[in-house]
Image (cartoon, grey):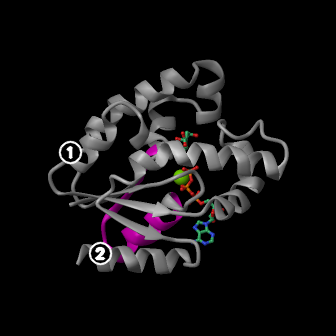
Amino acid sequence: MIVFLIGYMGCGKSTVGEILANKIQYRFMDFDNYLEDSIGMSITETFKQKGEIFFRKQEYLHLEKLLELDHYVVALGGGTPCYGDNITRLTGANNAKVIYLKASVNTLTDRLYPEKSKRPLISHLDSKEALNDFIRKHLFERNYYYNQAQATINIDNLTPQQVADNIIEILS
Ligand SMILES: Nc1ncnc2c1ncn2[C@@H]1O[C@H](COP(=O)(O)OP(=O)(O)OP(=O)(O)O)[C@@H](O)[C@H]1O
Ligand SMILES: O=C(O)C1=C[C@@H](O)[C@@H](O)[C@H](O)C1
Ligand SMILES: [Mg+2]
């Protein structure tokens, strides 16, 4: 089985994914790191030098390889399920479970504000209010895709460990 974690930037896909993989003795892959390795550049540099469309194409092409994995927990990129037919490729994959880590706009704003420089889509937003506004609109558009996950966990008041335990319950 492959467990795919989806959700907005900052919802905890990478943090929870690593904990979950350890708990269930699966391997862990962070798709953003994997793409950085295969492109040979950080995501920030890729957006700067090659543009977002190039990044989305790489994401689309490399997703095919992920679908062949087994005994893996994969933290996808925040935008991965929202482009092309990626979400149906994920939910339609044999032996895969797609889980949406759902966070409120305020939780995401609090978490992302100190870390926004690492995320090219939000790094230009100066104030916390501007970030909050951006996330509200962006999440509204993206929820259409995220809501197609096979399971959703409201993570606002949970520690990463608790989120991982919730996923284990869903999988059992
Ligand atoms: N359940 C949680 N409670 C509190 N803080 C958390 C929780 N999960 C993650 N965090 C913190 O929130 C920040 C973002 O988490 P993380 O990088 O795992 O998100 P992500 O979904 O992988 O984001 P991206 O899509 O940008 O890669 C980190 O600083 C992490 O330590
Ligand atoms: O939400 C997004 O579109 C992104 C999220 C990150 O995980 C990276 O994949 C990249 O910064 C784009
Ligand atoms: Mg991540």
Is residue 33 something one can see in this rendering?
no
Q: How much space separates mark 2 and mark 1, taking CA atoms? A: 22 Å
Task: Identify the residue at image location x=46%, y=28%.
Answer: 56
Task: Identify the residue at image location x=53%, y=52%.
Answer: 8
Depth check, front residue: 46 or 120? 120
Q: How many labels were placed on the picture?
A: 2
**Residue under circle 1?**
68
- Residue 129 in the magenta stretch? The answer is no
Magenta part of the chain: 14-31
What mark, if any, has residue 170 been given in the picture?
Answer: 2
| Quadrant in which ligand 1 is drawn | bottom right
Image position, residue 71 (x, y; %): 24, 61
- Residue 20 in the magenta stretch? The answer is yes
Which quadrant of the rendered structure holds the C terminus? bottom left
The secondary structure making up most of the magenta span is helix
Q: Is residue 64 above or below residue 105?
A: above
Image position, residue 109 (x, y; %): 70, 57
Q: Which quarter of the picture shows residue 70?
A: bottom left
